[in-house]
Amino acid sequence: MPQKFTVTPWEVKGELDYEKLIKQFGTKLLDEKILNRLKKHTGKLHFMLRRKIFFSHRDFDWILDKYEEGEKFVLYTGRGPSGHTHIGHLVPWVFTKWLQDKFDTELYFQLTDDEKFLVKPLSLKETTNYAMDNILDIIAMGFKPKKTHIIVNTLHIDKLYRIALKVSKHLTFSTVKAVFGFKNSSNIGIIFFPSMQIAPCFLPSEEKGHNVPVLIPAAIDQDPYWRPARDVAPKLGYYKPAQIHSKFIPGLGKEGKMSASKPETAIFTTDKPEDIRRKILNAFTGGRETAELQRKYGGNPDVCSVYKYYYFFFEEDDKKLKEIYEDCKSGRLLCGECKLRLIKKVEKFLEEHQKRRKKAKQKVDKFLIE
Ligand code: TRP
């Protein structure tokens, strides 16, 4: 069957069908049963779970088994530092923080400056600098300093290299070729790289000296890494890492995920109020040609990028979200007003985030892995 979408760690395009993706990747739906089980430990579910923004998993039920047996899990997530952070990147981070708070867990946070150097037309200096810049956003999210361990691959290679080597001995070229689509013309750095992203799955077990369950909250495009990670784990005597997968927040354009390569459709954490305003005012909406037609026939929130911003990030309150949805459909709420409300929300969020980002500069050392 011809596919209308592609999802790999380095490319996400087309119109995504998340149900098909679950089948294709062989993951499981986060269903009501498992969500109800989670609820027993966390109380009210995070809005990203209620809205199925986090929608898929592997072995999350096993993580809960372990937790209920008194074995605490550790979180692992990461970021490829190829530019400034945008709101799309914050989606899994917000949720990761929620998990850290609810379960009081340790968190390992990897920045793959090596990966981005290998796959992008950027110098190593640039990707390491972006890593240091992105760390400010991570700290600004409010993760616990004592329980959060940030790894910058080129700076903390000593933490990962021995594990990466062991992983790499079990991964053949033909396996990574099949999983990641490498070619004979791919540089050999990127061919080894998957073992670097897999290594933190086992780092907590190495550090603690016994097996530790690891849960990885991340966007679904990272899933290809976890399949070989799970194959290799038992061969090295570790637990298989578990995952919980998110969708992508769409950009402000007509389609596609929010992407740094289309800066006008992404809101960066470093954007100024005038950038926010301009980008949102130019955003693609589900509005009609004229205000008059829209009052009469209503708009279409289902295709609207502005509505998606509320949905994914800026309106946690389900009741208020529903109001926006219905007011749009009925023609009571026009795009201009709706955009202005969003601009206010984004401005307020970023003003505070940028203050915390500034303060984060003094705290970096507290967060880097020791
Ligand atoms: N490869 C990821 C990216 O390009 C970065 C990353 C490293 C990551 N380790 C991770 C993402 C663990 C999620 C979970 O963004």
Image (cartoon, rainbow, N blue to C red):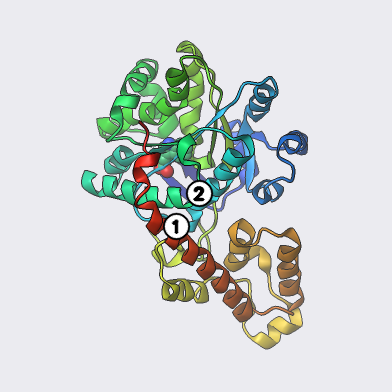
**Residue 119, position in %: x, y?**
30, 42
Q: CA distance from mark 1 to mark 2?
A: 9 Å
Q: Which residue is mark 1?
A: 356
Q: Residue at x 50, y 57 (%)?
A: 256
Q: Secondary structure at mark 2?
A: loop
Q: Nearer the viewer, residue 232 or 370?
A: 370
Quadrant assignment for ligand 1: top left
Q: Nearer the viewer, residue 191 or 267?
A: 267
**Residue 297, position in %: x, y?**
74, 79
| Image quadrant where residue 286 sits | bottom right
The answer to whether residue 180 is left or right of residue 27 is left
Q: Do labels 1 and 2 touch, CB within 8 Å?
A: yes
Residue 142 bears which disc, if any? Answer: 2
Q: Residue at x 60, y 44 (%)?
A: 98
Q: Secondary structure at mark 1?
A: helix
Against 54, is 317 above or below? below
* Amino acid type, residue under disc 1 in the picture: Arg
Q: Is residue 260 visible?
A: no
Q: Is residue 16 visible?
A: yes
Q: Residue at x 29, y 38 (%)?
A: 114
Against 173, is 109 above or below? below
Against 44, is 190 above or below? above
Give the mark nearer the N terminus: 1 vs 2. 2
Q: Nearer the viewer, residue 167 or 363?
A: 363
